Image: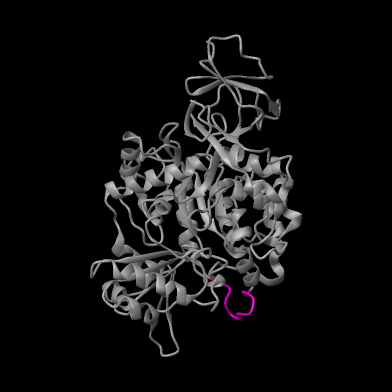
Amino acid sequence: MGPDLVLDNANIITIDAARPRAGSIAIRGSRIVGVGDIGAFNDTSATVIDLAGRTVTPGFNDAHNHMGGYGASINEVALHPTVVSSVEEIVAAIGDRAETTPEGVWVIGTGYDDNKLAERRHPTRYELDAVSPDNPVILNHTSGHFCVVNTAAMRLARVGEVAVPEGGVVALGDDGLPTGLLEEQAQTLARGLLHPRSIADMVQNLGAASDRYLAEGITSCQEAGVGGILGTREPLELAAYQEARRTGRLRVRVTLMPAVETLHSTDHHEDDDEPFVLDLGLHSGFGDEWLKFGPVKIFADGSLIGRTAAMFEDFEGEPGNNGYFQMNEATLHNLILKAHRSGWQVATHAIGDRAVSSVLDAYEKAQQAYPRVDTRHRIEHCGMCKEADVARIAALGVVPVPQGRFIGEIGDGMARAIGNRRGDCYRQRSFLDAGVVVPGSSDRPVVNGNPLLGIHDLVNQRTGDGMSFNPHEALTAEEAIEAFTLSSAYAAFDEADKGSLEVGKLADLVVLDRDPTTIDPTEIGETQVLATMVGGVFEFDQLGLV
């Protein structure tokens, strides 16, 4: 059947090796039915839109983000480095919000980075007490691996009274008392008091995030931990996604990664392997082109800028601190084995090189015990990776999921943490040269999730302070675009439907104001999204195309 819509006179970057560039694309319903030269489809009865030479790429796919958390953060006190630059400014911003917040209601700040504050430290509960003695306060670190609470929040969380969860630390001051800083799993004590959210609130957050994503050209994303991570327990989060989709508020395609804590063993026939599943045996792959289950998400360790990632060597300037696992390695390996055996694709958060190596050991053992074809197990972040483990990743068919944007936004803090080991940090070119597929992702809201900024950093490899980070790991602009399109689709087993502009694939695409592959690479981050199409419909349109 012929097309009902033709986009013509365009500069189309198809990400299709057989036809890298095209001038016209034909669409029927939600699918692409033709890709050709300029004017190739104008003899049809279809509506024809002249794009006047503008650049078109496949829709961007963020392979690791936190959509619900980002949507919630929009209404929280913004403490990002672009907004505040000192502890004093953080305290002032919290004080301003506390003045207009009813007594006893939580005040939530988000996005602070101690590495970028003038004092190079975390705020303390005492400083927060001075401006909010009656309202509980929680400050969420940009990494997601720390939070700071005031005394009112500590009382509610019973910090100092209840046991600290395994894989977490309650920081103590010189006086032996809690400073208000909670690391890793210890955040559960305070964050758990703010969850679960109502379905209505979660739907609102997903809607707000969807609107932002479409304006940035994101047509698909992969949600790294539904059901709750690091203290954010949400047992009805899937219901919220379903409601958001039903009511039209979820406007981008989402692959859901259930947190491993949501899985459980269940009764089964003696002929079946022991299942480790969601209820009724659900596992990776269930769903449709809008909403489906992807890998199960497991945490192995912490962060680089927080100096809690599990490393082989100590962090720079901190003898004796080489990070830690969020559970003992035997437990971690057992969870991976159970999930693998039960048919799950597994996505394990591992940032330190010691954690990455341990996770690879677990994947290898699981595959030896229960062989499966094309598992595409993932290592989320894969922040520090020894050269020998690059080869292991390739041999095992593992998909590393690094965040190029980390380099531009938090790269200076990472560099200070690891010193002369920067060559092992956030590899991209090394993986490609080894034959490994490398998707593009942001970990939003940890950093600004605009994919064009991520593409910029994959190419330019420069930190916010202008330091050259790992120039030998730089990608070309074409490779960086492919990372955020076809490679991200591959990471979720979606490459047959998404990621390139080919006949039969979903009509998910982006119209840009310039061609990122031909301009000065230092200007890629200035590229603007003019229109975003999802399933043949322009969901974001600055040009008045329809």
Q: Is residue 137 above or below residue 400?
A: below
Determine the residue located farthest toward the bottom in the rendered image: 175
Type of secondary structure dominating the magenta stretch: loop
Q: Is residue 5 above or below residue 485?
A: above
x%, y% of residue 42? 61, 13
Residues 463 and 187: in front is: 463
- Residue 481 left/right relative to 535: right
The answer to which quarter of the image holds residue 163 is: bottom left
Reply yes or no: does residue 316 show up in magenta. Answer: yes
Whether residue 373 is visible, yes or no, is: no
x%, y% of residue 101? 27, 66
- Which residue is rendered at x = 41% and y = 74% of the image? 91
x%, y% of residue 149? 37, 73
Number of callouts: 0
Residues 435 and 342: in front is: 435
Determine the residue located farthest toward the right in the rendered image: 472
Determine the residue located farthest toward the left in the rendered image: 103
- The span picked out in magenta is 314-323
- Residue 243 left/right relative to 347: left
Whether residue 544 is visible, yes or no, is: yes
- Which residue is rendered at x = 61% and y = 74% of the image? 315
Tell me how the rendering is colored.
one colour
- Which residue is rendered at x = 39% and y = 80% of the image? 127
Residues 86 and 399: in front is: 86
Reply yes or no: does residue 542 show up in magenta. Answer: no
Q: Is residue 259 above or below residue 352?
A: above
x%, y% of residue 399? 60, 46
The answer to which quarter of the image holds residue 229 is: bottom left
